[in-house]
Structures are given as structure tokens and as C-alpha cells.
Amino acid sequence: MTLHSFDRMVVEDEGEGDAVVCVHGLGGSSNTFTPLMPVLARHRVLRVDLPGSGRSQHAEGPLSIARFADAVQSACGRLGITRAHLVGHSLGTIVCQHIAVAAPALVRSLTLFGPLMAPPDAARVAIRARAAKARSEGATGMQDITTALLNAALSPDTRQRQPLAVAFVRESLMRQEAEPYARTCEALADAQPAAVDHIRCPVLLVTGDEDGVAPPQAVRSMAGRLHGARSTRVVVLPRCGHWTPIERVAECQGELRDFLSTLRQDRLETARHG
């Protein structure tokens, strides 16, 4: 594994093969995708820490979805990646959608865990309040935010039966510095939907039946707007909240493995008969 650092952003670069680029959500980092790495063994995997998150928390200035998308595209350009499967979680799914619209030649497919096009108005208000709390209260505010999100973002089954998953999410949130976390909240609160009807690549959407951020009905509605995509599949995992790759590791591994395998076989068939 090679660790790259440029423009105050850290990128992990591991493996060989078709490229996969992983984009985490609010309060996450490259580690959000560690559970998925076993099924990506035949791929070159880039895992970014977005500006303001993880090891990229020292990025300066305002943050936005556009800045995140530009940062991911810049990382691909610097590292010689011209085609990639994009894998996103939560806020990262919004970033991936914008990249797929802005740079369709770059995006081979989209796999979106806990996907949303943009927060609804009520959620925007709550996210801005969270930003204000983090900024004004610092570490104490982050502690309170973490406690609240553990209850709201994880399913009861996860909280009761998967202490390591709870510990992972708790650590991921508590390691975020308050000010850059606040700016990331503001980026999410200001997010606007991408023109998803322009997306042409295959799309896999995975959510939990207890995901309050990306509820199944909203994800199915999103899928209905992807009418230009080559294929669209919606998966709803039982007893699962918003941290899909952490709460339901085996299921997410299986869905991603099967999706990428199908795309690889389709490409081989096309080449054979082309």
C-alpha cells in the first residue's frame, strides 16, 4: 500500500487491476471501506480522506460538494486513473453522483451505500445545528454529537449485537476535529442534487431497512430517477442502519463482489463479440 499526500489530502493506493475509488461520508474516513477490501483484492483501490476529514483535516477554507468532487478527480488524475468504479457512503454518495455527471468517461460504475441525492430541508436544519454545536463546544460538542449519532444512525440490532461496529463508528466520529467536522457538516447541508438522469453507468444502491438518512422509500425513488443508467439495482438490508458497510459487512461484501463480477463478465462478453 502506498500513501499519497497532496493538496493537504491523503490518499491510500493499494493493489492492481481495475481501479476502484472509495469516497467516505460525514464523520468517516478511508477506514469506512476497510471491511470491503477483501472483495477488492483484484483491483487497484484508492481510498481518500476527503478535505476536512480523517488525515486530511488540515485542509483550509470552506468545504463543499464541488470541492470534494474536484479533489477526488484530481487524485485520479495525479495517479493515472482514467476509468474507475466509484464506491461511496452517505455524503460520499453525493460526491460520486456529481463526479458521474461531470466526468462520465471516468466512472465505470457507481456503488452507493446509504445513498442520498441531497438532504431534505429538515435534515439541513439539523445538520447546520450540529455544525454550530461542534464549532462552539469543541471536543465536548463532538462527544455529544457522537452519542446522539450512535443512537440515531445505527440500528438497535447493531447496537445490541455488534459492539465492534459500535466502537468503530464511535472512534470514527470522535477522531474528527470539531472545526473541520463543522465545515463538512455545512458542505452537506448546502449540497444540491446532481442531474442523476444524466448518469449512464451501472448503479448499485444499498441501504438499510432502518436507515433514517437514506430510507428505503427514498432510495427507491432515487433509483426511479436514474432512468438513463445502464442498469440499476436496489438492495435493502434487514436490521441495518446508516453505516451499511460497518453494520452488515458480509452482505455488503457480497453485493459489491457480485456487482463488479457481473460488470467484468459483461465487459468480457462485449469484447469477445465486439
Image (cartoon, rainbow, N blue to C red):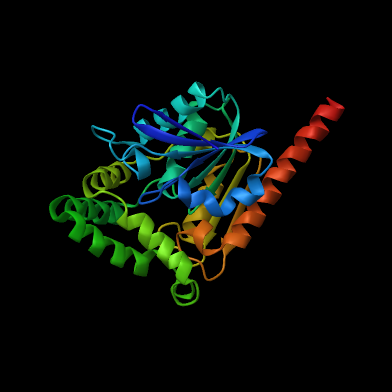
The structure residue drawn at horizontal position 65% and vertical position 38%, both measured from the top left corner, is 43
Q: Is residue 7 visible?
A: yes
On screen, residue 81 above or below 230: above
Q: Nearer the viewer, residue 264 or 120?
A: 264
On screen, residue 118 above or below 15: below
Q: Where is residue 62 in the image (x, y as percent from the top left)?
A: 24, 34
Q: Is residue 195 visible?
A: no
Q: Position of residue 159 (x, y in %)?
A: 43, 73
The structure residue drawn at horizontal position 27% and vertical position 53%, both measured from the top left corner, is 127
Where does the N terminus fall, quadrant-wise?
top right
Question: Of all residues shown, which one is farthest toward the bottom?
Answer: 160
**Left or right: where 110 falls relative to 119:** right
Question: Of all residues shown, which one is farthest toward the left?
Answer: 136
Where does the C terminus fall, quadrant-wise?
top right
On screen, residue 162 above or below 62: below
Q: Nearer the viewer, residue 30 or 5?
A: 5
Q: Nearer the viewer, residue 223 or 80?
A: 80
Q: Quarter-wise, where is residue 17 in the image?
A: top right
Question: Of all residues shown, which one is farthest toward the right?
Answer: 273
Q: Quarter-wise, where is residue 64 in the image?
A: top left
The structure residue drawn at horizontal position 63% and vertical position 40%, both measured from the top left corner, is 202
**Left or right: where 34 falls relative to 171:** right
